[in-house]
Image (cartoon, grey):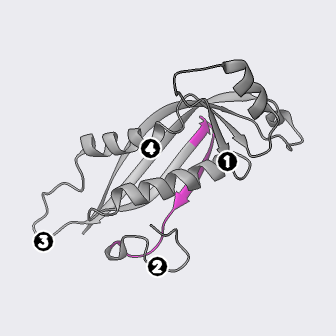
Amino acid sequence: MKLSITRRFEFAAAHRLQNHGGRCRFLHGHTYVLEVTLEAIQPEGGGGMILDFADLKVGVRAELANFDHVTLLETGDPLIEAIQGASGDLGGSTIIGVTDKPPTVEYLVERLTERLIRRFEPVPVRVARVRLYETPNCWADCVREGPVEHCGLSRPGEVER
């Protein structure tokens, strides 16, 4: 039997889409909500855990540390230099996350999914779905299809470890 578990997380980040024709071209922030769903095949008799929720929490929060309270800007955005210059020395804190594409919710959910696959799939679980809410009414999903038995990144077309 295939079972799944899901846990929600929140983090705050600012971004802008510098070439967007609407209001998203201005720097603004969101309280993002992330849902991570793991699945696994339950052995005969069942009763076991897919993964302890505490372990899921620790792993996801470690990845979110790269996004929480960070300003996400695309490479070449003139705000990068302006923010760095105005911020001074923050004792090594990361305040800017530079992305190679516009930091849309779709782009962010793909990057988070790749990170979570690398973190969790050495254990016998599969990252089945990652949902990232930008607002309560707007979100992007990254859903992985296929049988659970083929966990990992060894399939063609997926990110290499």
Residue 109 spot, x, y in % from top left: 57, 51
Q: Work out how far the residue at label 2 is from the one at label 1, CA to CA, in angstroms.
A: 25 Å
Left or right, residue 101 beside residue 109 = right
Q: Does 60 sit above or below residue 83?
A: below
The extreme bottom residue here reads 156
Residue 61 spot, x, y in % from top left: 40, 38
Query: Which numbered disc covers residue 99?
Result: 1
Q: Work out how far the residue at label 4 is from the one at label 1, CA to CA, in angstroms.
A: 16 Å
- Label 3 sits on residue: 44
- Nearest the viewer among 13 and 36 is 13
Query: Which numbered disc covers residue 155?
Result: 2
Q: Residues within 10 Å of mark 3 (few under 14, many from 20)?
A: few
Q: Residue at x 33, y 61 (%)?
A: 39
Quick one: label 2 or label 1, which is nearer the N terminus?
Answer: 1
Q: Residue at x 46, y 79 (%)?
A: 155
Quick one: label 2 or label 3, which is nearer the N terminus?
Answer: 3
Q: Work out how far the residue at label 4 is from the one at label 2, CA to CA, in angstroms.
A: 23 Å
Mark 2 and mark 3 in contact? Answer it, CB < 8 Å: no
Q: Residue at x 74, y 34 (%)?
A: 80
Quick one: label 4 or label 2, which is nearer the N terminus?
Answer: 4
Residue 140 spot, x, y in % from top left: 61, 50
Please provide the residue range marked out in magenta: 133-148
Q: Residues within 10 Å of mark 4 (few under 14, many from 20)?
A: some
**Is label 3 in a helix, a strand or a loop?**
loop
Question: Label 2 amino acid?
Answer: Arg
